[in-house]
Amino acid sequence: MSVVERLSGACAVRPAGEADTVDGVPAQAVARPSCAEQTSALLAACHAEGLAVVVRGHGSKLTWGRAPERVDVILETGAMGELVEHSRGDLVATAGAGMPLARLGDLLAEGGHQLVVDDLAAGRGADGAGSTLGGAVATGLSGPRRLWAGPLRDLVIGVRLVLADGTIARSGGKVVKNVAGYDLAKLLTGSYGTLAVVTEVTVRLHPLPQEEATVLARVPHDRLGPALAPLVASQLAPRTLEVSARPGADPLLSIGLGGSVEGTRERAQTLAAELGSPDLAGPSVAVVGPEGPPEKTAQLLADETGTHGTATDETDADHSARPTLVRATSRLSGIPELVREATDRGFAVTGSAGVGVLHARLPEGTAPDAVRRAVEEVRALTLRLGGSTVVLDAPPAVKAGLDAEATWGPVPGLDLMRRVKAEFDPVRLLAPGRFVGGL
């Protein structure tokens, strides 16, 4: 009896096609449950049969992390993509794990709210739809606005989940002040689907600003530190503080502001004047948004194509020509050195100088040995600067030469993480081998 026949009583199941792979590992079947109860029935059947399961939303980040040891069943969350509740008075919303982040943003905006999460995989995945809510939780996705609202793990206040044996559980609640029980939401955020299948997520919201503006400044490497230091503690309350750079070019600072119309415009002009002083960026400053000169903006953004965000140009998640994507972190004072050293080694970098998280990319076609050397050198630097380096994605030829330690780097608390995995998924059926330490 085929895998499809054995699982057909749980939910909609079809045979896997050629495109149904996870980082090159082919699946036997694709299941599409429409609710937590069907997910429970599916996982219970897989548990009884010893079938390995990997969850897929839009597939925008399926190549992140390590390739799984095996994939018997791909569990699609697309049929669980509804907005369950939007409590406008409490600034809380609940949605299915398959809800696209872009669609969720549109629905919340109708009530004047937003989930402050930037889709770092925008343009990737099925039809270029980017991340789903469940995929963002699985990978711990946070972007530029983390400086203002905190990381995603702090915005997730509740989850409904299904364990590997089919047990349905809840954690957290639908009000921000709920603290009852264990905080499984934080534990599951960034676990790459190795502990449980999340079917529903409750998140904390923020009001949409009346106005937004961005101040851009081209800053030489030797002035980056003096420019960043006052911005981090600025009374102008930047919502984002991004830096991007590529080999052979001066870094570009992008400072996002938001709030009332008058206040945002005043702060943008004040910030532009401060950055335009001869001691910092000099004349290479522009305001994007209210009253921002478009010709100056275009000049500042010249040659920045390909350095922003973390999405690649390929829509096929398993394309062998994809670039190498690395997340490098540092204490805030180390960001200028990290930017310079990474670009000297051929990386194009972009990330939040306000929270010390950069994403660095080497172009497709870079020789595997050269990639490994560059990653090792950046990792040595980030460790010295109090941070870490993780290879999020890379072409198959590069990944083949990286074991789990080379991918994730030193992992404090790995023994504890192994004990947690053994407690949640003792027979290792959920994305086995995809996470740190081969979890």
Image (spheres, helix red, strand yellow):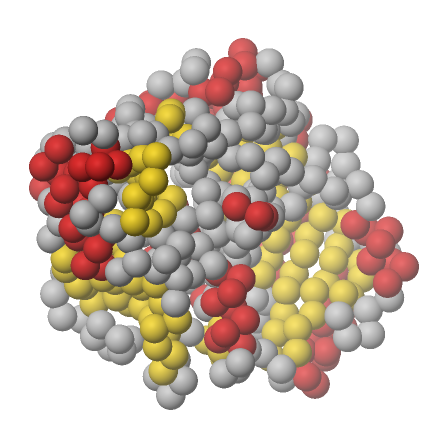
- Residue 222: quadrant of the picture: top right
Relative placement, left or right, of 173 versus 302 is: left
- Residue 171 coordinates in the image, percent (x, y): 18, 63
Image quarter where the C terminus lies is top left
Relative placement, left or right, of 368 versus 53 is: right
| Front one among 248 and 118 | 118
Q: Is residue 268 above or below residue 386?
A: below
* Residue 410 in sight from this viewpoint: no
- Residue 216 coordinates in the image, percent (x, y): 74, 58
Q: Residue at x 31, y 68 (%)?
A: 202
- Report the residue that reaches farthest toward the top: 369
Image quarter where the N terminus lies is top left
- Residue 426 coordinates in the image, percent (x, y): 10, 35
Q: Is residue 104 above or below residue 431?
A: below
- Residue 5 coordinates in the image, percent (x, y): 22, 37
Q: Is residue 91 above or below residue 182?
A: below
